[in-house]
Amino acid sequence: MKKNEEGWWASVLADESCFEEAVSKNDDEKALAHDWEKAKKLYEEDAIVSLEVIAHNHGGLLVAGEGLKGFVPHSHLLKSNNNDKTKKEGSLALYHGKTLKLKLIECTPEEDRAVFSERAAQVGAGQRRELFNALKQGEVIDGEVTNITDFGVFVDIGGVEGLVHISELSWGRVGHPSQIVQMKQQIRVQILSLSPERCRVALSLKRLYDNPWENIHEKYQREQVVPAKVTAIVSFGVFARLEEGIEGLIHSSEIPPSERALLQTEAKIDVRILEIDAKKQRMGLSLVLEGKNG
């Protein structure tokens, strides 16, 4: 499960390099002095602290105060459901000078890294260990969608927020998580991995269902003609869904120019299976023109 956990954190802190960028733009070195002993105690006690926002960039906020400094990723703010980059940075600018109640969720002195979360602070101080101890890897649990980002979905599972990475939302291709779930939607997820000391919970939605690619050769074969529905039109071709979780690509070379303009999302079409790669979960298709499926 280590791979899942690394993927989880890499997604959440994808813009973590912005921390150094924000620090370098601040002239008040004294305000950025870091009391690591205090930070470690804050982390161990799972305490809530109030810090002032002193800078921002496209990735989140730089906060400081009481001998502490750190970064709050955009995805860990309460009001963070904005995927428009221009609007997102504009909304972050409005935080300047404000004081936020936060919890320290990552404390790594040797890397000069402290990551705070406004979302985590919604759970009372000192409750992290108790809440995590109640969870078990592999457990199926109900939760509520609290945030939707480009890389996945945050879900409240009883006072602890976990992440369903975009790759764990469906066995099929997902253009954006908002295509699968909605804010405040009640969903059932499986716990893939737990890291209480780092406040990380990796979740999955797709693991609740059988992987349709495992036995795909029992149902589909090369040269077989089957019905499908267009799910996305891209520059290099068209994606079409044969069934839930099974999508294939009709490459542009397999689509006559006269037919491409007629293809629309949700259109029902017939396709011929050219290639099946169950391991990579890929399928190559060609468009079957009406009257030419022989």
Image (spheres, grey):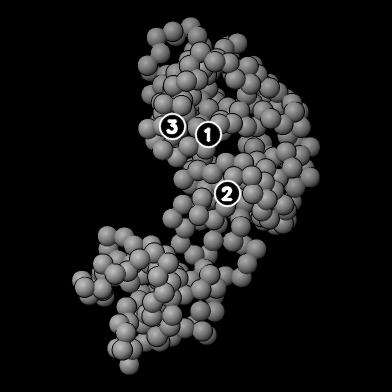
Q: Residue furthest left?
A: 257
Judging from the image, what secondary structure is the residue with disc 2 in?
loop
Can residue 7 be seen at all in this image of the molecule? no
Give the residue drawn at x 65%, y 19%: 49
Q: Quadrant of residue 284?
A: bottom left
Q: Badge 1 is on which residue?
A: 80
Q: Badge 2 is on which residue?
A: 182
Q: Is residue 72 left or right of residue 46?
A: left
Q: Say whether disc 1 or disc 3 marks the residue closer to the N-terminus.
A: 1
Q: Quadrant of residue 232?
A: bottom left
Asked if residue 52 is positioned above or below residue 183 in the image, the reply reads above
Judging from the image, what secondary structure is the residue with disc 3 in?
helix
Give the residue drawn at x 51%, y 73%: 243
Q: Is residue 257 left or right of residue 204?
A: left
Q: Quadrant of the N terminus?
A: bottom right
Mark identifier at residue 152: none
Callout 2 touching callout 3 (CB < 8 Å): no
Residue 117 place in picture, x, y as percent: 59, 29
Q: Is residue 125 left or right of residue 6?
A: right
Mark identifier at residue 88: 3
State the separation of the CA atoms marked 1 and 3.
Answer: 8 Å
Residue 182 place in picture, x, y as percent: 58, 49
State the separation of the CA atoms marked 1 and 2.
Answer: 14 Å
Q: Amino acid at mark 1?
A: Ser
Residue 223 place in picture, x, y as percent: 37, 87
Q: Amino acid at mark 2?
A: Gln
Asked if residue 25 is positioned above or below residue 241 in the image, the reply reads above
Is 83 or 66 nearer to us in this picture?
Answer: 83
Residue 153 place in picture, x, y as percent: 56, 47
Give the residue drawn at x 76%, y 39%: 131
State the separation of the CA atoms marked 2 and 3.
Answer: 19 Å
